[in-house]
Amino acid sequence: MSLETVSANRSHGGTQGVYRHPSAETGTEMTFSVFVPDHAPGARLPVLWYLSGLTCTHANVMEKGEFRAACAQHGVIFIAPDTSPRGDDVPDHDGYDFGKGAGFYVDATREPWAQHFRMRAYIETELPALVAQHFPVDMARQGITGHSMGGHGALTTALRNPDRFRSVSAFSPIVSPLHCPWGEKALGGYLGDDRGSWREYDACALIEDGARVPDLLVDQGTADGFLEEQLRTPLLAAACKKAGQPATIRMQEGYDHSYYFISTFMAEHVGWHAQRLNA
Amino acid sequence: MSLETVSANRSHGGTQGVYRHPSAETGTEMTFSVFVPDHAPGARLPVLWYLSGLTCTHANVMEKGEFRAACAQHGVIFIAPDTSPRGDDVPDHDGYDFGKGAGFYVDATREPWAQHFRMRAYIETELPALVAQHFPVDMARQGITGHSMGGHGALTTALRNPDRFRSVSAFSPIVSPLHCPWGEKALGGYLGDDRGSWREYDACALIEDGARVPDLLVDQGTADGFLEEQLRTPLLAAACKKAGQPATIRMQEGYDHSYYFISTFMAEHVGWHAQRLNA
């Protein structure tokens, strides 16, 4: 599988790169970013995936996430994919919360979305294979995190793939698309009205239905304007408690939904993953 | 003097704010950003000024600079002004290296620039007075740093005001506007053809003419495409050596001119300033 280097910058004792490739799943070119810390020749490093939120591309966390110092310290490769297919051929929607920039990490089954909006297959299958081919990664040591829509993506992807991921965390995740306007709009649009088919894309429903991870870490700001209606952190706490799913869910006083919040706790998340990936 | 809060976000155990005010010096509204770490009631904290490079506003370092963790750790307030006056009434130039976004921290004497392009007076006099009035700053403990054009601004402002600043550093500074195309265009445009009048805006010339600071720290990437023609770090090293000006000038292998470079060494610079400001 071919890969084009868009840019490469030395940073924090490693290389921050941006790469582009034709995706068979989405039928478009896809762009993603990878930070590779300096390492011994031949070494293979653990990987932390970061799934971004609504309206974002690979670039937001790359510029504002403040992950590189911690990744260099712990020897962790950091990969940030895009949030949807892009391009003139890809259908879109006039809202920020559906269509381009809002793939919700699902494989759409409804038209006109089904052809290109295959972000689940892209994240679960195609991109890992490409990364394994081109980067010094140890695919036996993967963790996943994300923000908001990407926190939903991280939690659901990990819960569906417990053998692939050793660690999972999230920043202000949408914890139950079945129970919030963003989720109802997106899953209804991409998957249709059969809410049973949404359950594999809902962290709370997956846990209710028996999915488990060893543990999970969530940070959520108390001043986040989306907390009450869209993110609904208490639903995740309740689902974990009821199911006996170990979880550390921290309400962070005064923090909002922005990268000013994410960057504050990023180093802790990287360290939390590194502890599990380097164990 | 009045001050309007544009935004305030909790981050890294402090508050990242953006503020706007009418400036008497520039005759425009000016915007700047301030990070204030949490502190004891009534405490006054040391200040680190950061002057930005060509094309930047207050926002670039605020989003990409990775200074907040270190400032919170050391209890340092971080202030980032804009790089020029803005607005429809302000004359501009079609290049990125002169006019808006390129004030070079000088008081222009030539028309049509003299009315609004008074960034030296703004940084040296007006903004410090405003900051002293509205923020919990200890103005007896100030340091200054900056990047590229802002590195030039930091070095020259400190060399002209040794009583005001206890510490000075720079990332990839323009070290001698007298000896590079950016500098010749800017100082010629703002000040006219009398190159003698440029010397107070040239770090190397100031040192040759007797200005001194206790010491200075400079980081410069070896892969910086502007190094040879525009930044000319060796001229500063030679001027310091000849004059006996203590200086730590570090060439950083493989780093370029971007915020990927700045953010890598930002925490070290903050720590270097904090050591002098908290002494």
Image (cartoon, coloured by chain):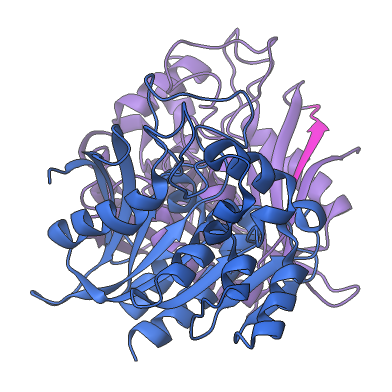
Chain colours: A blue, B purple
Q: Where in the figure is residue B109, as x and y percent of width and height?
A: 59, 17
Task: Tell me if residue A131 is in the magenta stretch.
Answer: no
Q: Quick one: quadrant of the C terminus of chain B? A: bottom right
- Report the residue at 80% width, 65% height from top: A222
Residue B125 placement, left or right of B237: right
Which image quadrant is residue B255 in?
A: bottom left
Q: Nearer the viewer, residue B266 or A191?
A: A191
Q: Where in the figure is residue B252, as x and y percent of width and height?
A: 26, 60
- Report the residue at 40% width, 46% height from top: A119
- Residue B118, visible in the rendered structure: yes
Which image quadrant is residue A74 in?
A: bottom left
Q: Where in the figure is residue B66, as x and y percent of width and height?
A: 52, 59
Q: Nearer the viewer, residue B27 or B213?
A: B27
Q: Is residue B6 above or below residue B276?
A: above
Q: How many marks?
A: 0
- Report the residue at 83% width, 56% height from top: B135
Magenta region, mostly helix, strand or loop? Answer: strand
Residue A264 placement, left or right of A269: right
- Report the residue at 46% width, 41% height from top: A108
Residue A177 placement, left or right of B125: left
Task: Give the residues in magenta.
Answer: B18-24
Q: Quick one: quadrant of the N terminus of chain B? A: top right
Q: Where in the figure is residue B229, as x and y percent of width and height?
A: 23, 34
Residue B257 placement, left or right of A187: left
